[in-house]
Image (cartoon, rainbow, N blue to C red):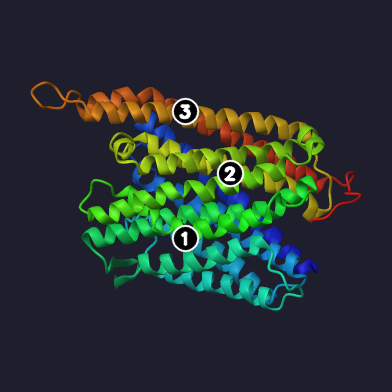
Amino acid sequence: MYENEERIVKAFVIASIAWGVVAMCIGLMAAIQLYLPQLNFANEYINFGKIRPLHTNGVIYGLVCNFIIGMSLYIVAKTSLVNLISKGLSWFLFWGWQITLIIGLMSIALGYTSTKEYAEFEWPIDIAIVVLWVTFGYIFFGTLAKRKTKHIFVSNWFSGGVIIVIALIYLVNNLSIPVYGFKGYSIFSGASDALVQWWWGHNAVGFLLTAGFVGTNYYFIPKLVNRPIYSYRLSLITFWGLIGFYTWAGTHHLIGTSVPTWIQNIGIVMSLLLWIPSWAGAFNAWMTCTSNKEEMKKNPVVWFFLSSIAYYALATFEGPLMAIRAFNTIAHNTSWVIGHVHSGALGWVAMTCIATFYYFIPQLYKKELYSYGLVKVHFVLAHLGITFYVVALWIGGIGQGIKSLSLTDSGSLTYTFVDILQFIEPYMLGRAIGGALFISGMLVMIYNLIMTINNPQKEMVKGGC
């Protein structure tokens, strides 16, 4: 890659880290307010209802999308043995994405929201995101089209799938009738709106937060351990399995609603079938990661990849579990779901990002990593944080669900809403402690990477990415 391409990738990586830490801090603020609600200080701009979508959109469009775009463009150029098709459009994509995200988050803080989960931005922001995403697709597929290799590397299959599916479902879910600037109304209503929303909502998880990261792992893990992918054929089975099953699974969030039962059942069946490609991908990545025993023993960056794979297997077990009606009745609409989301978001997505940053940034800047000791400190903090966060919400959420379903002999509710809030209170404290520990680890990483970049004494002698 020429210097300009490396500069673009560096920009996306730095933006991903910056947005990630900011969004996580906002999430921590939200978690603390669930334990001490008086800390919103009766201020309309920092109450839970405002900062929660700031957190989720900051993570998805800031941390995740910058990571996916940057890594996808890097991998497609490297594996195709060509430069990106347009450096001008690449910089337009980068700056356009950051500016659009800033304006979008400011609009949410000011109260402009479509109220849709993971799709709160109003129609002007939606249009900008669609234009930028199409630009991303043009750069990616245009670069792929002029490749000097006959073969398309498997990571590019995943990136291409993400680009196509996200473009389709984002556009459809956000179709609306504009009323005035920053206010429009969805063209869907009732059960149809719910179906389209969770077609988007679950596939934002299924593709942005799953397929995209599976794809980058198939590039960076072999590079880190200096071994080939354990099974290239299995990686393609994973790809087609995710494409075939994931797009149907979103209705497991609508079990017990007015959505037709047959549609709910399709979601249940497809969710259960997702176990196959998900665990096939986890097995493949795990076997690749553990194929170099020496590297696994001495390099703590490998530990982050191994942890991310383990949490991926866990999260993709929990999702199908939640699709089973008996369990869904207890766990859905409780804090258990938040624990499930964050076993994936912190354990899978964040751990993958962290491992990639620790490997990739020294390679980009041609420097040796400043301190592997600090990587181990970060590893401990991250795992303590996830344990506090997820276990607290698993236990609290199941208790919450059981109490909300409990009836007296006369058929009335055993526990009031206030009773359940009092029960869940200590688990909200555990959630906040977990979030604080995880963010502490992120700050350790930032210090380590800044010192790596600025340290003139530790030039990389060999290696490549």
Amino acid on which the number 2 mark rests in the picture: Ala
- Mark 3 vs mark 1, foreground winner is 1
The spot of residue 34 in percent (x, y) is: 37, 33
The quadrant in which the N terminus is found is: bottom right
Q: Which residue is mark 2?
A: 350
Task: Tell me the tag on residue 86.
Answer: none
Q: Nearer the viewer, residue 389 or 91?
A: 389
Q: Which residue is mark 3?
A: 391
Circle 3 Cα neighbour tier, 10 Å, few/some/many (<14 / 14–19 / ≥20): some
- Mark 1 vs mark 2, foreground winner is 1
Q: Does label 1 or label 2 sit earlier along the sequence? A: 1
The spot of residue 57 in percent (x, y) is: 46, 53
375, above or below 280, in the image: above
Amino acid on which the number 3 mark rests in the picture: Val
Q: Nearer the viewer, residue 133 or 199?
A: 199
Residue at disc 2, secondary structure? helix
